[in-house]
Amino acid sequence: MADPARNPAAPHDLPSFLPGPDGADPLMVISGLMLLGMVLAFGLFFLRLHTLPERMAHRTHKLQFEIVAVLGLLALFTHIHLFWVVGLLLALIDIPDFLSPVRRIAGASEKAAGLAPGEGDTLRDDDTPVAPHDAPEAPIAAKEA
């Protein structure tokens, strides 16, 4: 008995990817879903790669983390890849801390001069000069004796 929906002139063994008589096209649906999945996967991969310098700087607790994050945003919105490369280089490089040794030297110098920490500053917070001391205090070593 012949199928009433099939044309009698059509061959009996039709490929499965042809749309049926009702107009349903399973191959197009599968292709559309695969295209949507691939576009989402590519977008996620692109964003993951794009945030690589920021994640590297955050993971290693770099001082320049904010600069790397701003460079990443600039690269994303301006499409200038040099910002991304500079951000990646900043995320890979450790900037040395020059301020801590200078503060330690200043503190040791104040201690050797017999001043309290921070007393050797030449300007106050309101940018007025500190009045010179009439007589400097005795060094700390003399106070302990």
Image (cartoon, rainbow, N blue to C red):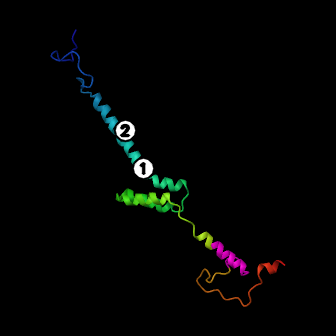
Tell me if residue 115 can be seen.
Answer: no
- Residue found at x 45% / y 57%: 88
Image quarter where the N terminus lies is top left
Magenta stretch secondary structure, dominant: helix
> Front-most of 96 and 17?
96
> Front-most of 4 and 39?
39
Which badge, 1 or 2, is on the more N-terminal residue? 2
Q: Is residue 7 magenta?
A: no
> Front-most of 82 and 31?
82
Badge 2 marks a residue whose secondary structure is helix
Badge 1 marks a residue whose secondary structure is helix
Res. 144 mark: none
Q: Which residues are magenta?
A: 103-118
Up/down of 142 relative to 97, above or below: below
Q: Which residue is mark 2?
A: 37
Image quarter where the C terminus lies is bottom right
x, y (%) of residue 74?
39, 60
- Residue found at x 26% / y 25%: 17
Residue at the top extreme, as displayed? 1
Up/down of 112 relative to 49, above or below: below
x, y (%) of residue 52?
46, 52
Tell me the quarter of the picture where residue 62 sits: bottom right
Tell me the quarter of the picture where residue 114 sits: bottom right
Q: Which residue is mark 1?
A: 49
